[in-house]
Image: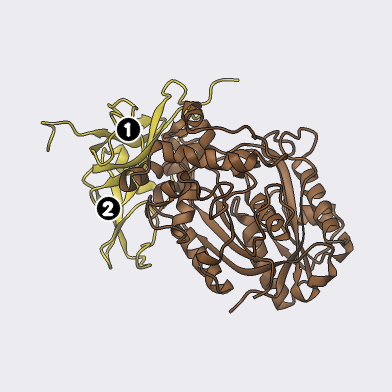
Amino acid sequence: MSASGVIIAGAAETNEIGRLPNQSTLGLHIEAAQNAVADAGLTMKDIDGIATVSAPGPVQVAHALGIYPDWVDGTGVGGTSFLLHVRHAAAAIRAGYAKTILITHGESGRSRVGAPPFRGDPASPAGQFEAPYGTLGPTTTFTIPLLRYMKEYGLTHEQLAYVAVAQRQWAAKNPRAMFRDIINVEDVLASRMVAYPFHLLECCLVTDGGGALVVTSADRAADFPKPAVHVLGTGEASETPMISQMLDFTESRMFRQAGLRAFAEAGITTADVDHLMIYDAFAHVPIYGLEALGFVKKGEAGPFISEGNTEPGGVLPLNTNGGGLSYTHTGMYGMFAIQESVRQIRGEAAAQVDNPQISVVVGNGGMFATCGVLVLGRQPR
Amino acid sequence: MPPRSKAVPAPTPETQPYWDGAAAGELRIQRCVDCGEPYFYPRPACPSCGSANVEWFTASGDATLYSYVINHRPAPGFEDDAPYAIAVVQLAEGPRMMTSLVGVPATPEALVLDMPLRVTFEQRGDISLPVFTPVTAGDAS
């Protein structure tokens, strides 16, 4: 069954991304929403469905924008949530629950203006069985599986570093990227050690910003100022609330599960994919993503990237905005990965790939905790 | 502001036997009576077959080093420990758990994947916390 019949009609980020100490989390949601609705040539009065993560939440965002929606989704499962929102919105539109759905992201991840405090619950499973061992956020947990992968599959420190090198080549073409200077493997390995084997340049940025999408039915595809981006297939999955309980430290089950579903729904194989975004909170995540979705065999993603296949001029353009490593990473980066895929399909990206027909977005939430996958296309299938 | 101390776990009714075991110097985990599968973290139903017919048992305390990071940005209370290892170990019974490694330098040279480890315990507030230490030659039980 194809998921076609649903399109992304509007997509935009906040006016600026990076360091925005004069905008709150809610303010970033509002600005992103206004930009996306304007991008679709609509007004807030046209919106009848809302989706966003739990803080500040869909009720707050809708109310701030003067929207009284018929459909509400507050799925908050980390940085991939917005991919799940697109999937849920597609289902809602096909079911007739709503006609024009707004999905928003805003996060004062760096400046922490109007942002919820970080807090851990000492009675939660993670509070009892991980936090006492000195974990402190993603740098200390998301990173733990990699040494096992390196031992099993021979990935080298230089190959890991090259993920950041390749993505910086894309960022260098993008005026909105936070880091744009070309780097080499030696630069990455000379950067400060954060959590061995990860150096600073193998970890994502921490920034402020936002983005939003307008999703509607494909029978309206000709009604909007920008080319329609068709939602051809979607998938979602969850795996583990704690990194220590990831099933196999050398592969992501959730990436594979959600990817298989999305590819089957779209009726595509990896050979059909012209452009790819894989959520890169850390340099190893694209490696796990390429292998889980079957773009390369197990253990081959490191050499695949270091041989130049994913950088400008390569056969599989990957993370063409520069990614979380070089473009921006507010904390919940998934919205920005979707935005870049939309720009590439529309032909309006800063580092534009040659006429991509199919773009795939692979999102991660938490530490290999949740996944959403979107197959987006220039044409319906 | 006074320095923050290391995180102390807060047991729940379902996890209390684990922490009681640690206080007695034992690593107690659960297994399914119906399918026989041992599992961690503590919870009242088997993740393999769904049975609520589960029991506690004392694990051997033997493990191997499955993976780790050496953290240079300390969590509150860990300032004097940095850089320190945050490890995941594979118990001899099969399940994996996060832990700290004691009695060994936090260096890639000293921390070799699959090295044998044995449980020991560290006091943290009112809680006894399972941690692991390398098994050295001549230390075989």
User: In the image, A31: left or right of A287?
Assistant: right
- List the residue tagged with mark 2: B94
Chain for disc number 2: B
> What hue represents chain A?
brown
User: Which amino acid, mark 2?
Assistant: Gly
Does residue A292 sit above or below A7 in this rendering? above
- List the residue tagged with mark 1: B101
Depth order, front residue of A273/B110: A273
Q: Do the dots labelled 1 and 2 sit on one chain? A: yes
Chain for disc number 1: B
Depth order, front residue of B93/A14: A14
* Label 2 element class: loop
Chain assigned yellow: B
* Residue A124 in sight: no
* Label 1 element class: loop
Residue visible at 63% across and 59% down in the picture = A83
User: Which amino acid, mark 1?
Assistant: Leu
Q: How much space separates mark 1 and mark 2, taking CA atoms?
A: 19 Å
